[in-house]
Image: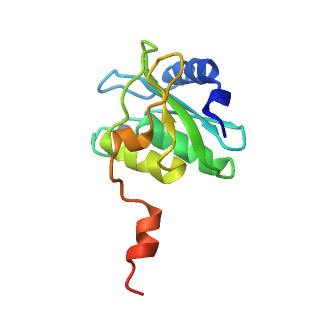
Amino acid sequence: MSTSKIPWQELRTLALHATTLSYAPYSHVTVGAAGFTDSGSVVTGSNVENASYGLTLCAECSLVSDLTRQGGGRLVGISVVAGDGQPIAPCGRCRQVLFEHGGKNLIVDDGSDHPERTIADLLPDAFGPDDLDTRSNS
Ligand SMILES: [Zn+2]
């Protein structure tokens, strides 16, 4: 799919709306994410914090749950924003989660007119599902 078909403004609007659905009583940093799939569907997520902190779910994790709930597919573009509407970088765990569901060519919004930054730029030499096939001993 051409990256020019990714509706970045719609994704940014949906991601910002998703920040209003966050559960962030501890950090007060609301985060929303909206992704576009190879079949043209849109998935969203919000961060869900936990009193134990380590069990907090990022907006990207919530988005991948939405992707799976909708029947799966591959992410081709994703916008992640904080409550101020500005892009916020996926954490290390989420970079790995996004790589699993979008592959190295997934475009991660940087707020520019024509985002081109890929998940591979954010997670070079990533370990992924192909490594399980090629490195398995059985
Ligand atoms: Zn994260």
**Whether residue 108 can be seen here:** yes
Residue closer to the observer: 55 or 130: 130
**In the rendered image, the vertical position of residue 9 relative to residue 60, given as above or below:** above
Which residue is rendered at x = 28% and y = 44% of the image? 54
Which residue is rendered at x = 33% and y = 53% of the image? 125
Q: Quadrant of residue 118?
A: top left
Residue closer to the observer: 63 or 25: 63
Which residue is rendered at x = 36% and y = 59% of the image? 127
Pick out the residue farthest to the bottom. 138
Residue 90, percent across and down? Answer: 37, 35
Residue 13, percent across and down? Answer: 59, 17
Residue 5 falls left or right of residue 75: right
Residue 2 falls left or right of residue 100: right
- Image quadrant occupied by the C terminus: bottom left
**In the rendered image, the vertical position of residue 60 relative to residue 23, given as above or below:** below
Q: How many numbered discs sit on the rendered protein?
A: 0
**In the rendered image, the vertical position of residue 28 relative to residue 53, given as above or below:** above
**Whether residue 56 can be seen here:** no
Which residue is rendered at x = 45% and y = 49% of the image? 99
Q: Quadrant of residue 11?
A: top right
**In the rendered image, the vertical position of residue 129 relative to residue 45, given as above or below:** below
Asked which colour scheme the image uses, the reply is rainbow
- Image quadrant occupied by the N terminus: top right
Residue 22, percent across and down? Answer: 47, 27
Q: Quadrant of ligand 1?
A: top left
Residue closer to the observer: 99 or 50: 99
Residue 73, percent across and down? Answer: 64, 50
